[in-house]
Image: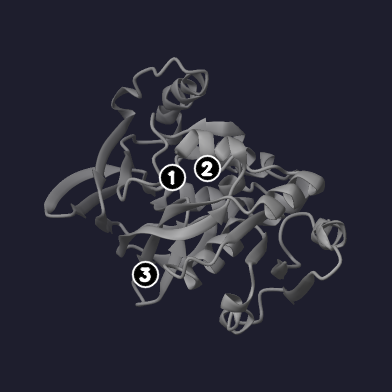
């Protein structure tokens, strides 16, 4: 087999287990090409010959994997998300293994499934891809606040950041979802492809990253305390009880979304802080990513 390994050396805790993966994977006749970035190199140059390999291993956080998937969108080239970031939400949503021997076995079996991707266009015209979710407001504030402590606290950094940002900006929101115009307000908005957050907590009841549609969720509160009932409901939802999310969440569905906010609120996608504020646009790229998946993932999404 021929593997192209894209390694983000500054993701997560810097444990570099991807080198163990390469050594464990290698058999007689295999070819493994490792290309490493610290965020400086353009990943497009790394992927210039991706079609010459059996699989691309994207080792890093969710942003790294999403970037690789976006650059390879609609090519059918298999991508193995290697969980080397802080939260690794995509790997969790895909029920991917986390230990090296199981990741090697997954790569050897080369079972693949196609999943939707999102494309976000920022206010400055730049475009990026995301696999899990994009949003603005409270979620982006949490991501930004957690940046400095992720290496020390891991996923707990996001929870700590949430409690430190109890009074996020409350904005008037104007949404255009497909052909519908919606006027509302709240502390944030999420456009969701995969629905599970840290600690396996689902934002919405269904996890449907293969249906060609986004869930659009408005945090319909005045402050962060209003989201506590939502969090409790989501924890119960994880146990299969499917409680109501209360009126703190306003939920819509669509495949093309435009968001405006007054006052403007900060934008993120897959945990990446953009440095820009609303407005932004999102469009669906149906079945654009081909991921190498586990048996459990096949059972979940077939």
Say if 62 sits above or below 122 in the image: above
**Viewer-nearest of discs 2 and 3:** 3
Q: Secondary structure at mark 1?
A: loop
Q: What x and y, as percent, mark residue 113? A: 49, 50
Q: Which mark is residue 168?
A: 1
Please say if the residues under marks 2 and 3 sit with CB atoms less than 8 Å apart: no
- Cα–Cα gap, marks 3 and 1: 21 Å
Q: Which residue is nearer to you in this view: 87 or 139?
A: 87
- Cα–Cα gap, marks 2 and 3: 24 Å
Indicate left or right for 222 with 196 as reference: left
Say if 121 sits above or below 216 in the image: below
- The image quarter containing residue 207 is top left
**Residue underneath mark 3:** 122
- The image quarter containing residue 163 is top right
Question: Residue drawn at (12%, 54%), measured in percent from left and top?
Answer: 179
Please say if the residues under marks 1 and 2 sit with CB atoms less than 8 Å apart: yes
> Residue lying farthest front?
29
Question: Residue drawn at (46%, 38%), measured in percent from left and top?
Answer: 301
Task: Assess disc 2: are there few (<14), some (14-19) or many (≥20) residues with their C-alpha within 10 Å of its C-alpha.
Answer: some
């Amino acid at each position: 087999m021929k593997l192209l390994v894209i390694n983000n050396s500054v993701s997560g805790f810097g444990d570099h287990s991807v080198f163990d993966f390469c050594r464990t994977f290698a058999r007689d006749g295999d070819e493994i090409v490792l290309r490493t970035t610290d965020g400086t190199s353009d990943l497009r140059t790394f992927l210039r010959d991706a079609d010459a390999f059996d699989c691309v291993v994207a080792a890093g956080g969710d942003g790294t994997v999403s970037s690789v998937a976006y650059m390879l969108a609609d090519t059918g080239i298999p991508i193995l998300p290697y969980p080397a970031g802080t939260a690794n939400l995509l790997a969790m949503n895909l029920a991917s293994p986390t230990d090296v021997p199981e990741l090697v076995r997954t790569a050897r079996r080369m079972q693949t499934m196609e999943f939707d991707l999102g494309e976000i266009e920022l206010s400055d015209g730049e475009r990026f891809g995301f696999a899990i979710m994009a949003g603005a407001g409270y979620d982006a504030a949490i991501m930004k606040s957690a940046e400095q402590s992720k290496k020390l606290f891991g996923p707990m950094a996001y929870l700590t950041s949430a409690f430190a940002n109890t009074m996020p900006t409350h904005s008037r929101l104007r949404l255009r979802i497909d052909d519908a115009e919606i006027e509302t307000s709240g502390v944030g908005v999420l456009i969701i492809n995969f629905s599970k957050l840290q600690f396996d907590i689902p934002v919405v009841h269904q996890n449907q990253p293969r249906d060609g549609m986004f869930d659009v969720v408005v945090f319909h509160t005045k402050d962060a305390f209003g989201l506590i009932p939502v969090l409790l409901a989501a924890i119960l939802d994880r146990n299969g009880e499917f409680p109501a999310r209360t009126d703190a969440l306003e939920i819509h569905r669509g495949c093309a979304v435009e968001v405006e906010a007054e006052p403007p609120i900060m934008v993120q996608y897959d945990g990446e802080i953009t440095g820009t504020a609303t407005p932004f646009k999102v469009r669906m790229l149906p079945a654009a990513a081909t991921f190498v998946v586990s048996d459990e993932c096949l059972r979940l999404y077939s």
